[in-house]
Amino acid sequence: MFHNFNKVRKFLNEEFNFHYDQIQLETKLELEIASRELFELIENLDLLFKIIIDLDGIDQLMKNHRILTIQDLII
């Protein structure tokens, strides 16, 4: 899990200018559901991990007012 966490930290730092030391498992991603940033993030994570992220699952989490965390992305 920590290998993936470090990959996500590096990606967020380089692509979205998140401060590396402030990215923790509990860090909240407060993105609008239809925002360009959310889709860029998902697309890049798909490529980074060579996986397919379920957009419907993320959509449901956000509709239920659940804020995504870094941990949600890597588990």
Image: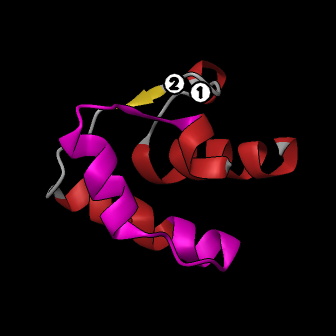
**Foreground pick, 53 / 64:** 64
Tell me the number on the disc at residue 69.
none
| Whether residue 29 is situated above or below residue 41 in the rendered picture | above
Is 59 a magenta residue? yes
> Could you tell me which secondary element the residue under label 1 belongs to?
loop
Which numbered disc covers residue 23?
A: 1
Relative to residue 74, is residue 52 drawn left or right? Answer: left
On-image quarter of the N terminus = top right
User: Where, by quadrant of the figure, is residue 34 drawn?
Assistant: bottom left
Q: Start and end of the magenta stretch?
A: 45-70
Asked whether the residues under the numbered discs 2 and 1 touch, taking CB atoms below 8 Å apart as contact, a structural biologist would say yes
24 or 13, nearer to the observer: 24
Residue 46 placement: quadrant: bottom right
In the rendered image, residue 29, in percent from the top left (x then y), is placed at 38, 35
Question: Marks 2 and 1, Cα distance to the nearest angstrom?
Answer: 6 Å
Residue under numbered circle 2? 27
**Compared with residue 33, is residue 72 higher up or lower down, i.e. above or below?**
above
Residue type marked 1: Ile
> Tag 2, which secondary structure?
loop
Place of residue 68 in the rendered image (x, y in percent of width and height, measured from the top left):
41, 37
